[in-house]
Amino acid sequence: MARIEHHPILPVLERNTIQFTFEGKAYTGLEGDMISSALFANGITVFGTHERDSAAKGIYCANGQCSECMVIADGSPVKACMTELSEGMDIQQCRGYPPLPDDGSSPRTGDIECMKTPVLVIGGGPAGMSAALELAKHGVHVVLADDKTMLGGKLTLQTHNFFGSCADCWAGKRGTDIAEILEKEIETHGPDMIDVWLRSSAVGVFSDRKVGIVRNGEYVLVEPDLLLIATGAREKALAFQGCSLPGVFGAGAFQTLVNRDLVRASENLFICGGGNVGLISAYHALQAGINVKGLVEALPECGGYRVHLDKIRRLGVPVYTSHTVLRADGGTQLESVTICEVDSGFKPVSGTEKTFDVDTLLIAVGLSPVDELYTQARKYGMNVFAAGDAETIAEASAAMMNGRIRGREMAQQAGKEPLIPGEWEGLTETLRSKPVQRDIPVPDPQGDIYPVIRCSQDIPCNPCVEACPVRNITLENGELTGRAQFSGDMCLGCAQCVLACPGLAITLVDERYDPSGKRALVTMPFEFEQDTVAAGDRVTTVDFEGNDLGTGTVVAFRNADSQNRRLLILVETPFEDRLHAAGIRLFSRDSGTEGEVSCDDSSTIICRCERVTKGEVLSLIRAGYRDMNQIKAALRAGMGACGGKTCRDLILRLFREEGIDPDEVTLPVERPPLSEVPLGVFAGRDRT
């Protein structure tokens, strides 16, 4: 593991060096590092041990939702993923429960600060930023609070080009660029209209209709007239033997380390989950120079966009559908993962096991709304709205549109009169819709130079239409989800459509290349370092789904600032392959080691915080327990630092597997604070 020094998409900026110690040994980090990224960059993946069984603990969510990454920094327990490294910081592993710090300071006795605001927006991601901008544009003051050190939410991790409408949600631009666009627009309004609170975690909504926020270590109460919850989503957990080993963590955590912190967080990884998060993480890993040994999806088909699936297949990543992770193995760090087929009931099929040597396993099995604050606010009768993933899980383009609508609705509630265009709601629903599979038509070449467009799903998208300088690409029936099609009237050969397509689903064929008609020149999108292959190299060409097609020769690259960090690679192919060549294979496949592997899933960890096993929970369910609060009292499951955010759904799943009707199960009582807060914060401890 090391720093990423070159990246095909992300700029690698010079930063000042910071000295720190970990377990008494000196290390260096970089200015702006979170503790977790500095440790990973130095090859440190074990951050502590558990009180119950001394099991090693490492990073898991990297989003402040759990406490797996807790360390002792300068004497205080902190989340490594949320705490910025500072010069001379002394960091220790957190062994068991952290001790209370003895700093000798005295608590203040004054009242907690309470302030009023017309609007409080919690969450500075795509939905929250978009809503705040709409409110400010219509003259409504906003406090925009986010627990990170920068605005943007998951946009800051998304280096790929977005789908959607160019006019309405910046389709064709990269998520990282959209985050910068929105942040700069917020800055133009200034704090008089949008007061941005970073490092500010909302920890509870109370019956007096106030919101408790820990802002830069100080506790304040905010009483808003209107409240918007745009807190995004958290990744769902998956339970299997070895799931709590360091090296097993969420795909979002991986994207944080690689794309935000520019740390090569793995050498060899495997991915569990074929939704967009898993598929995109595989692509991001390859771009960072990490070997992706495979991806499993329990369903017969991957649920993510087909273009995301096919682009990793073209690069050489094996995708195993109707498979799951059986177990993960290692000492204090993941060393191997075993997968197997599953039957129609998702039960493992004995004799189908394959084992892969990896140091990282990414869990990408879906998202759940972070909506606890919204639920509490509704309970107490507040004028509250939800937007983005906190309302409905969807792509960021939908979250931005949804945020704009909620912003204008709230402006109306505040006495303003903004118009909400009638088509916005419909566009949001379109952007949220699940794409329908369709056949890719066999290209019908017209002329001697033309694009080959492979829209395999009705994903809402129009960048290629907007990019064509002669407007010869249109959408079928004029619908945003219609198939993009080339009219065949004229093609300039500019390859702007190849550069614009978010799904890397367009190539440009030039039949003029060889007058003898034996070869053609195919221009393909390429988002890797240019020195990955060189002009003159013989390469294996693949079709759109990643099947080997034949052999081609790299002729040249095209690269310009206007290409938005996407190279074009020009490949000479046999003439008969020209319509099917969609990429080149860059990476070799690892088929793993076959052999039956035993599995004792009774020892599988269900509650990470308290190390409660599947067997322990099942024993209570089978004894007649139907109240999760009783299970919590008996086993401490859900009583840990994360407040049950990872184990609640896993326990509910065990009830379902035991045939228990969900209506018979009493859910756990949720109480603030929703995340850990040092007692000294509530006591008003004087930090000076």
Image (spheres, grey):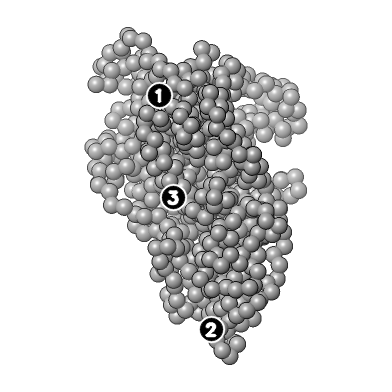
Specify the amino acid type for callout 2.
Tyr
Specify the amino acid type for callout 3.
Asp
Q: Secondary structure at mark 2?
A: helix
Direction from residue 38 to residue 202 in the image, left or right: right
- Asked if the residue at tag 1 contacts the one at tag 3, i.e. Cβ–Cβ closer than 8 Å, the answer is no
Question: In which quadrant of the rendered view does residue 457 lie?
Answer: bottom right
Direction from residue 539 to residue 324 in the image, left or right: right
Which residue occupies 53% across, 66% down? 469
Dot 1 or dot 2: first in sequence order is: 1
Which residue occupies 24% across, 38% down? 87
Q: CA distance from mark 3 to mark 1?
A: 29 Å
Q: Mark 1: few, some, or many residues within 10 Å (few <14, many ≥20)? A: many
Q: How many marks?
A: 3
Dot 3 or dot 2: first in sequence order is: 3
Compared with 74, 33 (above or below) is below
Q: Secondary structure at mark 3?
A: helix
Which quadrant does the C terminus fall into?
Answer: top left
Q: Which residue is mark 2?
A: 513
Q: Which percent across, then down, holds residue 79?
A: 40, 33
Compared with 274, 124 (above or below) is above
Q: Is residue 417 visible?
A: yes
Q: Which residue is mark 1?
A: 214
Q: Which residue is mark 3?
A: 177
Q: Which percent across, then down, holds residue 206?
A: 51, 16
